[in-house]
Amino acid sequence: MTTLSVSSGQCLRVLRVFPRRTALTPTDDMAVVGDPPMEGMRPEADEVHVSCTFTWDRERAEYLAQAWGQYYPTVKLGGPAFGTPVNGFKPGMYVRDGVTFTSRGCNNHCPFCLVREREGKLREYDEFAEGYEVNDNNLLQCSQHHIDKVLAMLRKQRKAARLSGGLEAARVTDTFAEALRGTRISEVFLAADHNDSLKPLERAINKLSFLGRDKLRCYVLIGFNGETIQQAKARLLKVWEIGCLPFAQLYQPPTDKRITYSQEWRDLQRTWSRPAATKAAMKCPK
């Protein structure tokens, strides 16, 4: 059962509620997606925390807070979409077990990203929870000492490491690449969100090529700032040619209103975010 310690020393039973299920949503019995179930099936809890990641889910999250508030006396609404301050990290609380954050924030000012606005400048955690999946926003902005600590932690895990936060390609060094050689790797995610990021990506992949395409994923933001579908296709193809498996993401603005993309855009995103579909489109073995 997920508990939360308070200043009195009491441990509160916390039920976490999410507007949608994602790859990071917890799967324990005290994590629920959507509306409250019927009477007799609702877990016992001292508090309900409705956690919302995406701004376009805020209306849904507000509705869920009211819905769960009919049955529980204390319901709290928060998460990245509501600008909730990030104070530390409790593993398994709002993301599934195995995922950890060893740093927060970022020093970049990317126009399509809210990390700097929401979390501030990069700050390292001197002590961090262990896990096999590191989801830091910009791990490679951390000090070499911190990166070494993170990699040492990953080598102790039973599962192969997954660096899913999106490494800044321009910061991939020979030293970092060599350190990964001694680490069991499941996947490493980089990012190529605009054309200027392609050359740094190519240099990074040259250093990491020993991992092979299947372990080298790359977030590719598409549809931002008037980008045409032809331009997006060209950038996705270039990422493939460099040696990565692209993970296409359709841009959505930091507001409650989502962009409604055409079927052609949605098909493009689907094809270039699923490895099997991407390989089929490129006519290569799965």
Image: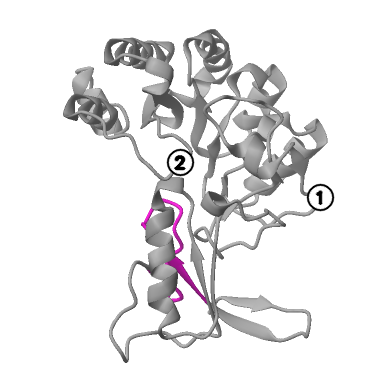
* Amino acid residing under circle 1: Asp
Residue 232, which numbered label? none
Q: Is residue 210 left or right of residue 152?
A: left
In magenta stretch: residue 26 = yes
Q: How many marks?
A: 2
The kind of secondary structure the magenta stretch mainly shows is: loop
Q: Which residue is depicted at the point 42% across and 24% down? A: 220
- Above or below: residue 246 compared with residue 39: above
Give percent across and percent down for residue 81.
Answer: 52, 50
Mark nearest the camera among 2 and 1 is 2
Q: Is residue 190 left or right of residue 121?
A: left
In which quadrant will I find the C terminus? top left
Give percent across and percent down for residue 188.
Answer: 51, 33
Colour scheme of this structure image?
Answer: one colour
Q: Which residue is depicted at the point 45% across and 79% down? A: 69
| Residue receiving disc 2 | 255
- SS assignment at label 2: loop
In magenta stretch: residue 122 = no
- SS assignment at label 1: loop
- Above or below: residue 181 compared with residue 70: above
In the picture, residue 111 is in which quadrant? top right
| Residue receiving disc 1 | 126
* Amino acid residing under circle 2: Thr
Q: Name which of mark 2 and mark 1 comes first in the sequence.
A: 1
Start and end of the magenta stretch? 15-32
Q: Is residue 85 left or right of residue 40?
A: right
Give percent across and percent down for residue 158.
Answer: 55, 54
User: In this view of the protein, can residue 19 be seen by the observer?
Assistant: no
